[in-house]
Amino acid sequence: MTDRKIRVLIAKPGLDGHDRGAKVIARALRDAGMEVIYTGLRQTPEMIAEAALQEDVDVVGLSILSGAHNALVPAVIDKLTENGLDTVKVFVGGIIPKGDIPNLEEKGVYAVYGPGTDTQRVVAEIKAAVNPKSD
Amino acid sequence: MTLIDPKAIRNGDRLALSRALTAIENNTSESKRIQAALFPYTGNAHLVGVTGSPGSGKSTLVNQLAKTMRQSDHGEKPPKIAILAVDPTSPFSGGALLGDRIRMQDLAGDKGIFIRSMASHGALGGLAHNTAAFASLLDGAGFDVIIIETVGAGQAEVDIARLAHTVIVIEAPGMGDDIQAIKAGILEIADIMVVNKADRPEAENTARALKVMLEMGRGGESMPVTGKHLMRSIADKDETPKQADKKPGWETPIRLVTAIEGSGIDTLVNDIRQHRDYLESSDLWQSKEAYRLEKDLEALIKDKLLSQWQESLDEEKYQKVLMEIIQRKRSPIEALDLLL
């Protein structure tokens, strides 16, 4: 049996068109041996949850710079749950005010990354989130 | 992990289907059970391959094809469509960036379409090791058309000819001269040729060079041409005589398309249907299926024999023989007798 690859969906919900951060993360995860599905810009929560279902990903990473995270993130998580994907781990990257983070974590987000985050930290935390036993 | 129910897959449970594909990818024991349960339902889907060089517009074309196929069935039920999009695995990290969905956003929200991205895992023929198994599962799940998009392929990635019933080779204008067009390989497997980006000025020239190439390939009136493009690449060094003399041949059309705008797509969808009709009416459908199933079986046997051999291997002896080969004391051919 070959080792199971971690599959990650990187998506940009909402209307902002800045996907440099998403691409940097996608590249770093690829270099860490993961299979990264990048869906491009302007995704609705429905589109993201549907892509996550079809691709059977372990993790969904949402990149949001528009300030609409308080609306979009819970919407994505609700749609994932609706699709039966309640075991999928969700992280958020972008410009997120500190005060909003607890609210997102309560909704089920396991990590929030701001500008300047070390990509190796993102990699390590994905591995830990998917396989809690190994480190 | 809950067990996956093959009946649920038959009934259109998309999550069960998706999980089953993952099970195949990871070669779990469960995947065998599901594949066996669905196998009796396979053999109905039309497998359409789309191949061509990186950036020629494969994903954009697949997006348009699927969209048009879902719309244009004259009053009939539109076909359920699955798309398998293969992108390369990094040879260094083993990771992959699968970006074909970016071009397929028009298809989101249509429950009659299922898109799955695959990493090639180092397979060299333009497909992934499990692409055939994925296609078979989707066939058994009841999809009518399965579009398989290869890795951006150059000249020799012709595995798709063995898997797909209908192969579309897509070229963009301005890539190489007419000598490129008469080289062997990817152009020979085309059942339908597409020159994409037809809004560019060089597109007509590219189409003309391809036309010349195809006419040379036809080699005059006397040669039996049935299924030539389909069968030549897969029939080399293989026995299987094809019933080449009974039906009129398939003439590979060359279509000018601007995929990003959707122009020329209706004609192409029509070509795909006609090619299916042609295969079915000429028995080529049957012979192609038989050939593919035989090759699949061979591949399974090879995998199994290899893993059995690896299990029974005396590692110490293997290293010793390997060292002798590295020191040029023994040839690899001689080593075979010692190791098998």
Image (tube, rainbow, N blue to C red):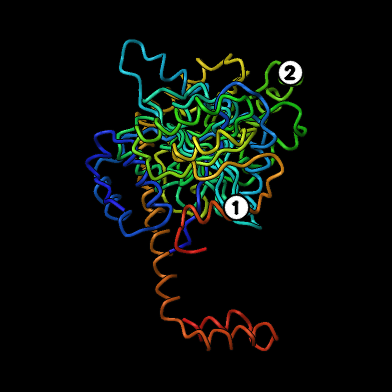
Left or right, B143 with reference to B272:
left
Q: Which residue is mark 2?
A: B200
Chain label for disc 2: B
Residue B45 can be seen in this image: yes
Is residue A3 depicted above or below A28 in this figure?
below
Residues at marks 1 and 2, CA–CA distance in whole angstroms? 43 Å
Q: Foreground residue, B326 or B93?
A: B93
Left or right, A87 with reference to B7:
right
Quadrant of the rendered image containing residue B42: top left
Can you tell which of label 1 and label 2 is closer to the viewer? Answer: 1
Is residue B204 depicted above or below B134 in this figure?
above
Q: Residues within 10 Å of mark 2 (few under 14, many from 20)?
A: few
Q: Residues within 10 Å of mark 1 (few under 14, many from 20)?
A: some
Left or right, B46 with reference to B122:
left
Task: Name which residue lies at 60% across and 23% down.
Answer: B254
Question: Which residue is farthest front?
Answer: A99
Q: Which residue is mark 1?
A: A123
Is residue B148 depicted above or below B330 in this figure?
above
What amino acid type is highlighted by mark number 2?
Answer: Arg
Q: Foreground residue, B262 or B49?
A: B262
Residue A130 in the image: x percent, y percent?
A: 47, 53
Task: Name which residue lies at 51% across and 84% down.
Answer: B315
Question: Which residue is farthest left?
Answer: B7
What amino acid type is highlighted by mark number 1?
Answer: Val
